[in-house]
Image (cartoon, rainbow, N blue to C red):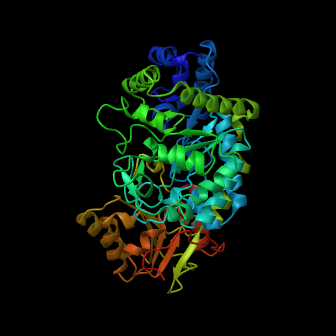
């Protein structure tokens, strides 16, 4: 390969298009020789058959141009981040943390890997190995297995083994750990202030386990590590001390390092990538995760070519990086599987989702013994639920209509649903609370009320009505800290249908709630 072709292998592009490859996409492949593509739900994915056809078109184009196998990647974590929306609705990592089951984590990984392989995706940006010790973390939350580094590491290893058993490469993220920040790197640069000793004991522990399990890729975080890079710490993505020093030398990682998206505000400064693409490559990043912007793609390519030609990026560095990428592609070719599309949401996969959901349901409080619910047929239940929103770009919750009321109605016919905004106004709150006078029991499904004061205030006022209220945290378990007076509190960690069915079953006493909180709730003894 010449310099231009080598540089191309360091770039993973994205584009807008679902059905066919536009002349612009074909031209980009001809000009820049990219290593592959990241697929995003709104831009590229409609249904399994369409995705498979699109991916085959991309691989055919690469072959026609004499390019190596394309890396085709997406974010399919389960839970709140499922770019492949038709995949089996796995409840997600924190639900797995509540089960304490490596066996289920491995099964979840197998489901993820098999379904991605069926549509031609060979890289999964999962699992998330961040230790979520900060309740105010706006971007990780339920994407984490929990706050215990040992548990996070154990479940991450199991999921990696499951994903990679299907010939799909797992990507452990966000190195060196995004679990103790109060900022979202999509919007700004966060920092981790802890000592090296603390980093090794907490943040790095799951990554160490994941690397021993042969995770093929590590994704870097766009946050500064003060104990390693000082007060003016750059994002880890741009830090040689982090990538070359900590990841390569200290932890011994020999696989592929990929950046998080290079358009995040934590890293983007002015015209993206004239400088940052080169800095990331110099720091040791093998692959740069690019945006859909053709100008960004061109700038990154030109910056790396020019940097190599003028010696800012050594040809040895470039060649070593591409060698690692080609080794990954060889592994993918050797381990490729070709499942039929019929595996997607098949009975076996749905059973895994249902088992995770049922074993994750966690009873935190039942002080007044409202549970299990035992009501006369004429009694009326009101189910209140906020309309889900994508609370971060790493979120696909807005695609989901939680079936909590429908699931409860399966056990008690006199059940009505009330949808409220994620942040209800005073008038909206008053209107719904007035309607509650006609009901005997209220089921309140909260969605991150801990981080949304208007929703929390709605619930506090609801609790003052003096009626039995079953509080169900449908996402972050921390919500109880926003209304500590609640006497009945259950966690699902997911708004997906298996979790809704599981919690309804448990609330009516048809299953035992065996889940354990994977994180601590502030103020809860």
Estimate the x, y position of residue 88 in percent, counting from the top left.
63, 47
Vertical comparison of 306 with 72: above or below:
above
Residue 318 location, quadrant: top right
Estimate the x, y position of residue 159 in percent, counting from the top left.
66, 52
Which residue does the image show at 38% across and 31% down from the upper left?
273
Q: Position of 364 compared to 60: left or right?
A: left
Residue 296 visible in the shown view? yes
Estimate the x, y position of residue 146 in percent, counting from the top left.
55, 64
Estimate the x, y position of residue 6 in percent, counting from the top left.
55, 22
Vertical comparison of 243 with 379: above or below:
above
Which residue does the image show at 45% across and 43% down from the upper left?
237
Residue 171 location, quadrant: top right
Vertical comparison of 448 with 33: above or below:
below
Which residue does the image show at 46% across and 27% down from the upper left?
15
- Which residue is the extreme one toward the bottom? 368
Which residue does the image show at 68% across and 31% down from the upper left?
327
In the depicted view, which residue is nearer to us: 209 or 339?
209
In the depicted view, which residue is nearer to us: 74 or 30?
30
- Which residue is the extreme one toward the left? 427
Tell me the quadrant of the picture where the N terminus can be found.
top right
In the depicted view, which residue is nearer to us: 258 or 61?
258
Q: Position of 375 compared to 277: left or right?
A: right
Residue 495 visible in the shown view? no
Q: How many marks?
A: 0
In the depicted view, which residue is nearer to us: 424 or 381?
424
């Amino acid at each position: 390969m010449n310099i231009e072709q080598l540089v191309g292998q360091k770039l993973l592009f994205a584009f807008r298009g679902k059905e066919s490859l536009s002349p612009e996409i074909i031209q980009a492949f001809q000009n820049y020789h990219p290593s592959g593509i990241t697929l995003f739900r709104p831009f590229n994915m409609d249904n399994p058959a369409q995705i498979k056809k699109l991916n085959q078109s991309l691989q055919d184009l690469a072959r026609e141009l004499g390019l190596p196998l394309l890396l085709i990647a997406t974010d399919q974590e389960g839970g709140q981040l499922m770019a492949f929306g038709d995949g089996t609705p796995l409840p997600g990592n924190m639900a797995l943390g509540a089960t304490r089951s490596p066996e289920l984590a491995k099964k979840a990984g197998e489901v993820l890997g098999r379904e991605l392989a069926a549509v031609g995706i060979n890289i999964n940006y999962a699992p998330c190995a961040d230790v979520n010790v900060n309740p105010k973390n706006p971007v990780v939350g339920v994407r984490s297995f929990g706050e215990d580094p040992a548990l996070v590491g154990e479940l991450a290893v199991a999921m990696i083994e499951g994903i990679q058993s299907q010939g799909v490469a797992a990507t452990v993220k966000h190195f060196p750990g995004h679990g103790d920040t109060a900022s979202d790197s999509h919007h700004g640069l966060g920092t981790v202030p802890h000592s090296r000793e603390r980093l090794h004991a907490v943040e790095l522990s799951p990554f160490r386990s994941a690397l021993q399990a042969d995770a093929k890729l590590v994704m870097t975080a766009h946050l500064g590590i003060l104990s390693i890079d000082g007060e003016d710490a750059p994002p880890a993505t741009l830090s040689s001390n982090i990538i070359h020093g900590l990841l390569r030398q200290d932890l011994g990682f020999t696989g592929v390092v990929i950046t998080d998206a290079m358009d995040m505000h934590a890293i983007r400064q002015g015209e993206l990538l004239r400088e940052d693409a080169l800095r990331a490559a110099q720091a040791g990043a093998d692959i740069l995760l690019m945006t859909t912007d053709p100008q960004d793609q061109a700038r990154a390519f030109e910056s790396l070519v020019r940097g190599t030609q003028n010696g800012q990026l050594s040809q040895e560095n470039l060649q070593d990086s591409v060698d690692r990428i080609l080794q990954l592609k060889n592994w993918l070719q050797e381990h490729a599987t070709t499942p039929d599309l019929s595996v997607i949401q098949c009975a076996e996969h749905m059973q895994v989702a249902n088992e995770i959901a049922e074993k994750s349901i966690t009873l935190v409080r039942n002080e007044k013994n409202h549970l299990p619910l035992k009501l006369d047929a004429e009694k009326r239940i009101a189910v209140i639920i906020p309309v889900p929103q994508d609370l971060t770009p790493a979120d696909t919750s807005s695609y989901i209509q939680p079936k909590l009321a429908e699931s409860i109605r399966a056990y008690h016919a006199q059940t009505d649903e009330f949808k409220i905004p994620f942040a209800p106004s005073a008038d909206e709150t008053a209107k719904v609370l007035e309607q509650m006078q006609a009901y005997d029991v209220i089921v309140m499904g909260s969605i991150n009320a801990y981080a949304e004061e208007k929703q929390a205030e709605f619930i506090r006022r609801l609790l003052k009505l003096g009626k039995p209220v079953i509080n169900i945290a449908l996402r972050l378990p921390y919500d109880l800290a926003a209304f500590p007076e609640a006497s009945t509190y259950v966690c699902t960690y997911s708004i997906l249908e298996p979790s809704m069915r599981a919690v309804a079953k448990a609330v009516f006493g048809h299953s035992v709630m065996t889940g354990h909180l994977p994180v601590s709730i502030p103020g809860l003894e």
